Amino acid sequence: MAPHDVIVVGGGPGGSTAAWRLARAGLRPVLLDAAVFPRVKVCAGWVTPEALADVDVDPEKYPLTIQPFTACRFAFAGASHETRWRRPASYGIVRSEFDHHLLERARAAGADVRDGARVTAVTRDGAGVRVVSERGVFVAPVVIGAGGHHCPVAKAFGEVSEREEVVIAQESETRLPPERRDALRGGAPELFVEPDLKGYGWYFPKEDVLNVGIGVVAGPRVDLPRRREMLLASLRAAGRLPADLPIAPFRGHAYVVRRRAPRRLAGAGFCLAGDAAGLARDLSGEGIGPAIRSGLLAADAVVAHVRHGTPLEAYTREIVRRYGRGEAGWLARRLSRLPDACARVLVRAMLATGITRRHLVFGGIFGMREVSS
Protein backbone atom coordinates (compact mmCIF):
# COMPACT_ATOMS: atom_id res chain seq x y z
CA MET A 1 0.00 0.00 0.00
CA ALA A 2 1.31 3.48 -0.91
CA PRO A 3 2.26 5.55 2.16
CA HIS A 4 0.13 8.53 1.06
CA ASP A 5 -3.40 8.92 -0.32
CA VAL A 6 -2.93 12.50 -1.51
CA ILE A 7 -0.04 14.81 -2.40
CA VAL A 8 -0.54 18.51 -1.68
CA VAL A 9 1.88 20.85 -3.45
CA GLY A 10 2.07 24.21 -1.66
CA GLY A 11 2.03 25.07 2.03
CA GLY A 12 0.19 28.40 1.99
CA PRO A 13 -3.34 28.83 3.37
CA GLY A 14 -4.95 26.78 0.57
CA GLY A 15 -2.55 23.85 0.72
CA SER A 16 -2.23 23.70 4.50
CA THR A 17 -6.02 23.94 4.91
CA ALA A 18 -6.52 21.12 2.39
CA ALA A 19 -3.94 18.93 4.17
CA TRP A 20 -5.51 19.68 7.56
CA ARG A 21 -8.98 18.78 6.30
CA LEU A 22 -7.72 15.60 4.62
CA ALA A 23 -5.89 14.43 7.73
CA ARG A 24 -8.91 15.08 9.92
CA ALA A 25 -11.00 13.03 7.48
CA GLY A 26 -8.68 10.07 8.02
CA LEU A 27 -6.66 10.23 4.78
CA ARG A 28 -2.85 10.33 4.63
CA PRO A 29 -1.74 13.53 2.90
CA VAL A 30 1.84 14.56 2.27
CA LEU A 31 2.41 18.30 1.81
CA LEU A 32 5.42 19.60 -0.13
CA ASP A 33 6.61 23.21 -0.23
CA ALA A 34 9.80 24.71 -1.66
CA ALA A 35 10.27 27.11 1.27
CA VAL A 36 11.36 26.36 4.81
CA PHE A 37 8.72 27.66 7.23
CA PRO A 38 8.25 30.16 8.72
CA ARG A 39 8.93 31.98 5.47
CA VAL A 40 8.38 35.49 4.19
CA LYS A 41 5.30 35.76 1.99
CA VAL A 42 4.64 38.92 0.01
CA CYS A 43 1.03 39.86 0.75
CA ALA A 44 -0.82 42.85 2.16
CA GLY A 45 -1.73 40.57 5.07
CA TRP A 46 -5.41 41.02 5.76
CA VAL A 47 -8.01 38.32 6.15
CA THR A 48 -11.80 38.41 6.28
CA PRO A 49 -13.98 37.15 9.14
CA GLU A 50 -15.46 34.54 6.76
CA ALA A 51 -12.00 33.17 5.97
CA LEU A 52 -11.11 32.88 9.66
CA ALA A 53 -14.41 31.09 10.30
CA ASP A 54 -13.76 28.71 7.39
CA VAL A 55 -10.43 27.67 8.87
CA ASP A 56 -11.73 27.58 12.48
CA VAL A 57 -9.45 30.36 13.72
CA ASP A 58 -10.95 32.42 16.54
CA PRO A 59 -9.42 35.92 16.30
CA GLU A 60 -9.83 36.33 20.07
CA LYS A 61 -7.65 33.27 20.67
CA TYR A 62 -5.20 33.54 17.77
CA PRO A 63 -1.79 33.72 19.52
CA LEU A 64 0.09 35.82 16.94
CA THR A 65 -0.16 39.28 15.35
CA ILE A 66 -3.76 40.15 14.56
CA GLN A 67 -5.34 43.60 14.24
CA PRO A 68 -9.14 43.94 13.95
CA PHE A 69 -10.27 46.62 11.51
CA THR A 70 -13.60 48.33 12.11
CA ALA A 71 -12.83 51.15 9.67
CA CYS A 72 -11.15 51.49 6.29
CA ARG A 73 -10.55 54.42 3.97
CA PHE A 74 -10.66 54.57 0.18
CA ALA A 75 -8.74 57.28 -1.65
CA PHE A 76 -9.17 58.23 -5.30
CA ALA A 77 -8.78 61.38 -7.39
CA GLY A 78 -7.82 63.57 -4.42
CA ALA A 79 -10.71 62.50 -2.17
CA SER A 80 -10.67 60.06 0.75
CA HIS A 81 -13.78 58.36 2.17
CA GLU A 82 -14.00 56.29 5.34
CA THR A 83 -16.36 53.40 6.04
CA ARG A 84 -16.98 52.14 9.58
CA TRP A 85 -18.51 48.91 10.85
CA ARG A 86 -19.86 47.99 14.29
CA ARG A 87 -17.77 44.80 14.34
CA PRO A 88 -14.48 43.91 12.63
CA ALA A 89 -14.87 43.65 8.86
CA SER A 90 -11.33 42.35 8.35
CA TYR A 91 -8.20 41.53 10.31
CA GLY A 92 -4.57 42.40 9.71
CA ILE A 93 -2.19 39.45 10.08
CA VAL A 94 1.47 38.76 9.28
CA ARG A 95 1.58 36.13 6.56
CA SER A 96 4.77 34.44 7.74
CA GLU A 97 3.12 33.87 11.14
CA PHE A 98 -0.33 32.99 9.83
CA ASP A 99 0.89 30.51 7.21
CA HIS A 100 3.22 28.79 9.67
CA HIS A 101 0.39 28.52 12.20
CA LEU A 102 -1.88 26.81 9.66
CA LEU A 103 0.92 24.54 8.46
CA GLU A 104 1.78 23.38 11.97
CA ARG A 105 -1.88 22.71 12.63
CA ALA A 106 -1.99 20.48 9.54
CA ARG A 107 1.07 18.66 10.84
CA ALA A 108 -0.55 18.22 14.26
CA ALA A 109 -3.66 16.77 12.58
CA GLY A 110 -1.53 14.05 10.98
CA ALA A 111 -0.38 15.51 7.64
CA ASP A 112 3.15 14.54 6.57
CA VAL A 113 4.63 18.01 6.06
CA ARG A 114 7.86 18.34 4.07
CA ASP A 115 9.05 21.92 3.71
CA GLY A 116 12.23 22.68 1.80
CA ALA A 117 10.96 20.22 -0.82
CA ARG A 118 10.86 22.08 -4.13
CA VAL A 119 8.83 20.16 -6.72
CA THR A 120 10.70 19.69 -9.99
CA ALA A 121 8.34 17.44 -11.97
CA VAL A 122 4.69 16.34 -11.95
CA THR A 123 3.59 13.50 -14.25
CA ARG A 124 0.92 10.85 -14.45
CA ASP A 125 1.99 7.46 -13.14
CA GLY A 126 -0.40 4.70 -14.16
CA ALA A 127 -3.60 5.33 -12.24
CA GLY A 128 -1.99 8.01 -10.08
CA VAL A 129 0.35 10.99 -10.06
CA ARG A 130 4.14 11.04 -9.60
CA VAL A 131 5.69 14.12 -7.99
CA VAL A 132 9.47 14.57 -7.96
CA SER A 133 10.84 16.91 -5.29
CA GLU A 134 14.17 17.83 -3.75
CA ARG A 135 13.23 15.67 -0.77
CA GLY A 136 12.18 12.56 -2.66
CA VAL A 137 9.70 11.11 -5.12
CA PHE A 138 6.07 10.68 -4.12
CA VAL A 139 3.27 8.76 -5.82
CA ALA A 140 -0.42 8.96 -4.90
CA PRO A 141 -3.80 8.61 -6.59
CA VAL A 142 -4.46 12.37 -6.37
CA VAL A 143 -2.50 15.63 -6.21
CA ILE A 144 -3.82 19.02 -5.06
CA GLY A 145 -1.95 21.94 -6.61
CA ALA A 146 -1.85 24.89 -4.22
CA GLY A 147 1.56 26.26 -5.09
CA GLY A 148 0.58 29.77 -6.15
CA HIS A 149 0.95 31.52 -9.48
CA HIS A 150 3.81 29.26 -10.64
CA CYS A 151 2.38 26.01 -9.23
CA PRO A 152 3.98 23.00 -10.96
CA VAL A 153 0.71 21.05 -10.81
CA ALA A 154 -1.06 23.86 -12.67
CA LYS A 155 1.71 23.89 -15.28
CA ALA A 156 1.44 20.11 -15.71
CA PHE A 157 -2.34 19.69 -15.79
CA GLY A 158 -4.05 23.09 -15.66
CA GLU A 159 -3.72 24.07 -19.32
CA VAL A 160 -2.04 27.36 -18.41
CA SER A 161 -2.38 29.93 -21.20
CA GLU A 162 -0.11 32.80 -22.22
CA ARG A 163 -3.29 34.91 -22.44
CA GLU A 164 -3.75 34.94 -18.67
CA GLU A 165 -4.12 38.30 -16.96
CA VAL A 166 -1.34 38.67 -14.41
CA VAL A 167 -1.19 41.19 -11.57
CA ILE A 168 2.26 42.26 -10.39
CA ALA A 169 2.77 43.75 -6.96
CA GLN A 170 5.42 45.07 -4.59
CA GLU A 171 5.16 45.49 -0.85
CA SER A 172 7.16 46.48 2.19
CA GLU A 173 6.38 44.97 5.59
CA THR A 174 8.15 46.58 8.53
CA ARG A 175 8.05 45.57 12.20
CA LEU A 176 8.59 48.82 14.07
CA PRO A 177 10.75 49.16 17.18
CA PRO A 178 8.91 50.22 20.37
CA GLU A 179 10.02 53.84 20.09
CA ARG A 180 8.39 54.19 16.64
CA ARG A 181 5.11 52.38 17.23
CA ASP A 182 3.34 55.65 17.94
CA ALA A 183 3.36 56.14 14.15
CA LEU A 184 0.68 53.43 13.88
CA ARG A 185 -1.55 54.39 16.79
CA GLY A 186 -5.16 54.94 15.79
CA GLY A 187 -4.39 54.32 12.15
CA ALA A 188 -7.08 52.81 9.95
CA PRO A 189 -6.04 50.93 6.81
CA GLU A 190 -6.35 52.81 3.56
CA LEU A 191 -6.71 51.71 -0.06
CA PHE A 192 -5.63 53.92 -2.95
CA VAL A 193 -7.16 53.40 -6.40
CA GLU A 194 -4.65 54.02 -9.18
CA PRO A 195 -5.61 57.00 -11.41
CA ASP A 196 -5.82 54.75 -14.50
CA LEU A 197 -7.92 52.15 -12.63
CA LYS A 198 -5.33 49.44 -13.37
CA GLY A 199 -4.63 48.60 -9.74
CA TYR A 200 -4.51 49.92 -6.20
CA GLY A 201 -2.13 50.65 -3.36
CA TRP A 202 -2.55 49.95 0.32
CA TYR A 203 -1.49 51.09 3.77
CA PHE A 204 -2.13 48.48 6.49
CA PRO A 205 -1.06 49.05 10.13
CA LYS A 206 -1.15 45.82 12.16
CA GLU A 207 -0.24 46.16 15.85
CA ASP A 208 3.52 46.89 15.55
CA VAL A 209 3.74 46.01 11.84
CA LEU A 210 3.24 48.32 8.87
CA ASN A 211 2.54 46.92 5.39
CA VAL A 212 2.61 49.23 2.38
CA GLY A 213 2.31 48.07 -1.21
CA ILE A 214 0.91 48.44 -4.69
CA GLY A 215 -0.41 46.04 -7.33
CA VAL A 216 -1.31 46.63 -10.98
CA VAL A 217 -2.30 44.59 -14.00
CA ALA A 218 0.88 43.70 -15.91
CA GLY A 219 1.33 45.36 -19.28
CA PRO A 220 3.96 46.79 -21.62
CA ARG A 221 3.65 50.33 -20.24
CA VAL A 222 3.32 49.53 -16.55
CA ASP A 223 6.07 51.22 -14.52
CA LEU A 224 5.62 49.64 -11.10
CA PRO A 225 8.61 51.37 -9.40
CA ARG A 226 7.26 54.78 -10.46
CA ARG A 227 3.80 53.95 -9.08
CA ARG A 228 5.38 52.72 -5.86
CA GLU A 229 7.31 55.98 -5.39
CA MET A 230 4.18 58.01 -6.09
CA LEU A 231 2.31 56.05 -3.41
CA LEU A 232 5.09 56.60 -0.87
CA ALA A 233 5.18 60.32 -1.67
CA SER A 234 1.40 60.51 -1.17
CA LEU A 235 1.59 58.70 2.17
CA ARG A 236 4.37 60.97 3.40
CA ALA A 237 2.54 64.11 2.27
CA ALA A 238 -0.57 62.97 4.17
CA GLY A 239 1.46 62.26 7.33
CA ARG A 240 0.62 58.56 7.28
CA LEU A 241 4.25 57.65 6.69
CA PRO A 242 6.69 59.86 8.63
CA ALA A 243 9.55 61.05 6.43
CA ASP A 244 12.15 59.79 8.90
CA LEU A 245 10.57 56.34 9.35
CA PRO A 246 12.74 53.67 7.69
CA ILE A 247 10.76 50.85 6.09
CA ALA A 248 11.83 47.42 4.91
CA PRO A 249 12.88 46.93 1.28
CA PHE A 250 10.09 46.20 -1.18
CA ARG A 251 9.57 42.66 -2.43
CA GLY A 252 7.66 41.59 -5.53
CA HIS A 253 5.18 38.87 -6.41
CA ALA A 254 2.60 38.05 -9.06
CA TYR A 255 -0.75 36.28 -9.26
CA VAL A 256 -3.32 35.39 -11.90
CA VAL A 257 -6.82 36.80 -12.04
CA ARG A 258 -9.15 34.16 -13.52
CA ARG A 259 -10.67 36.71 -15.86
CA ARG A 260 -9.18 35.71 -19.19
CA ALA A 261 -8.25 32.14 -20.27
CA PRO A 262 -9.19 30.38 -16.97
CA ARG A 263 -7.11 27.38 -15.95
CA ARG A 264 -8.53 23.87 -15.87
CA LEU A 265 -9.39 23.38 -12.20
CA ALA A 266 -9.71 19.59 -11.93
CA GLY A 267 -9.41 16.39 -13.91
CA ALA A 268 -7.98 12.90 -13.73
CA GLY A 269 -6.06 12.79 -10.47
CA PHE A 270 -5.73 16.51 -9.73
CA CYS A 271 -7.36 19.67 -8.33
CA LEU A 272 -6.07 23.25 -8.25
CA ALA A 273 -6.73 25.56 -5.30
CA GLY A 274 -6.07 29.18 -4.39
CA ASP A 275 -3.76 31.24 -6.59
CA ALA A 276 -2.82 28.10 -8.54
CA ALA A 277 -6.43 28.11 -9.74
CA GLY A 278 -6.45 31.88 -10.29
CA LEU A 279 -9.08 32.45 -7.59
CA ALA A 280 -7.93 35.85 -6.31
CA ARG A 281 -10.91 38.22 -6.24
CA ASP A 282 -11.44 40.24 -9.40
CA LEU A 283 -10.17 43.86 -9.10
CA SER A 284 -9.00 43.58 -5.48
CA GLY A 285 -6.72 40.54 -5.68
CA GLU A 286 -7.84 39.34 -2.22
CA GLY A 287 -6.69 35.73 -2.24
CA ILE A 288 -6.49 34.32 1.30
CA GLY A 289 -10.25 33.75 1.62
CA PRO A 290 -10.62 32.00 -1.76
CA ALA A 291 -7.49 29.95 -1.06
CA ILE A 292 -8.85 28.68 2.25
CA ARG A 293 -12.33 27.98 0.88
CA SER A 294 -11.02 26.23 -2.23
CA GLY A 295 -8.61 24.19 -0.07
CA LEU A 296 -11.57 22.92 1.94
CA LEU A 297 -13.58 22.19 -1.20
CA ALA A 298 -10.65 20.41 -2.86
CA ALA A 299 -10.11 18.26 0.23
CA ASP A 300 -13.78 17.32 0.39
CA ALA A 301 -13.76 16.44 -3.33
CA VAL A 302 -10.66 14.28 -2.88
CA VAL A 303 -12.17 12.44 0.09
CA ALA A 304 -15.27 11.66 -1.99
CA HIS A 305 -13.08 10.58 -4.90
CA VAL A 306 -10.82 8.30 -2.86
CA ARG A 307 -13.62 6.69 -0.87
CA HIS A 308 -16.49 6.61 -3.34
CA GLY A 309 -14.99 7.17 -6.77
CA THR A 310 -16.75 10.52 -7.23
CA PRO A 311 -15.21 12.31 -10.25
CA LEU A 312 -13.03 15.27 -9.29
CA GLU A 313 -14.82 17.40 -11.87
CA ALA A 314 -17.44 17.90 -9.13
CA TYR A 315 -14.90 20.26 -7.55
CA THR A 316 -14.88 22.39 -10.71
CA ARG A 317 -18.65 22.69 -10.61
CA GLU A 318 -18.54 23.84 -6.99
CA ILE A 319 -15.84 26.43 -7.69
CA VAL A 320 -17.82 27.77 -10.67
CA ARG A 321 -20.95 27.95 -8.52
CA ARG A 322 -19.14 30.04 -5.91
CA TYR A 323 -16.71 32.09 -7.98
CA GLY A 324 -18.05 32.04 -11.53
CA ARG A 325 -16.48 30.70 -14.70
CA GLY A 326 -13.59 33.13 -14.66
CA GLU A 327 -15.14 35.95 -16.62
CA ALA A 328 -14.74 39.53 -15.45
CA GLY A 329 -17.05 40.57 -12.63
CA TRP A 330 -20.04 42.88 -13.10
CA LEU A 331 -18.13 46.03 -12.19
CA ALA A 332 -15.05 45.14 -14.23
CA ARG A 333 -17.21 44.48 -17.31
CA ARG A 334 -18.89 47.85 -17.06
CA LEU A 335 -15.71 49.76 -16.42
CA SER A 336 -14.07 48.12 -19.44
CA ARG A 337 -16.88 49.36 -21.70
CA LEU A 338 -16.61 53.00 -20.64
CA PRO A 339 -14.16 55.65 -21.87
CA ASP A 340 -11.45 56.27 -19.26
CA ALA A 341 -12.88 59.62 -18.18
CA CYS A 342 -16.37 58.15 -17.70
CA ALA A 343 -14.99 55.16 -15.78
CA ARG A 344 -13.20 57.52 -13.39
CA VAL A 345 -16.40 59.48 -12.82
CA LEU A 346 -18.27 56.24 -12.04
CA VAL A 347 -15.61 55.06 -9.61
CA ARG A 348 -15.51 58.46 -7.90
CA ALA A 349 -19.30 58.37 -7.47
CA MET A 350 -19.28 54.82 -6.07
CA LEU A 351 -16.57 55.62 -3.53
CA ALA A 352 -18.35 58.81 -2.45
CA THR A 353 -21.64 56.97 -1.79
CA GLY A 354 -21.63 55.23 1.58
CA ILE A 355 -23.98 52.34 0.79
CA THR A 356 -22.27 51.56 -2.53
CA ARG A 357 -18.83 51.77 -0.95
CA ARG A 358 -19.86 49.50 1.92
CA HIS A 359 -21.66 46.78 -0.04
CA LEU A 360 -20.36 46.82 -3.62
CA VAL A 361 -16.75 47.91 -3.11
CA PHE A 362 -15.71 46.72 0.36
CA GLY A 363 -18.14 43.80 0.57
CA GLY A 364 -18.30 42.57 -3.02
CA ILE A 365 -14.76 43.30 -4.22
CA PHE A 366 -12.65 43.06 -1.07
CA GLY A 367 -14.79 40.71 1.02
CA MET A 368 -14.78 43.16 3.94
CA ARG A 369 -18.03 42.85 5.83
CA GLU A 370 -18.96 42.46 9.46
CA VAL A 371 -20.26 39.09 10.59
CA SER A 372 -22.87 38.79 13.31
CA SER A 373 -21.50 37.22 16.46
Image (cartoon, helix red, strand yellow):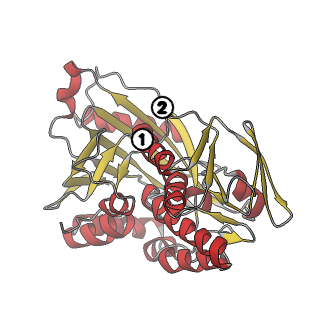
Circle 1 residues within 10 Å: few <14, some 14–19, many ≥20: many
* In the rendered image, the vertical position of residue 63 relative to residue 263, given as above or below: above
218 on left or right of 177? right
- Residue 145, percent across and down? 65, 57
Label 2's element? Answer: loop
Q: Are marks 2 and 1 in contact (CB under 8 Å)?
A: yes
Which label is found at residue 250? 2
The answer to which of 310 and 117 lies nearer the viewer is 310
The answer to which of 131 and 365 lies nearer the viewer is 131
Amino acid type, mark 2:
Phe
> Is the C terminus in the top left, top right, bottom left or bottom right quadrant?
bottom left
- Residue 335, percent across and down? 46, 71
The answer to which of 116 and 336 lies nearer the viewer is 116
Residue at horizontal 36 percent and vertical 70 percent from the top? 364
Residue 76 appears in the picture as rendered: yes
Identify the image quadrant of residue 263: bottom right
Amino acid type, mark 1:
Gly
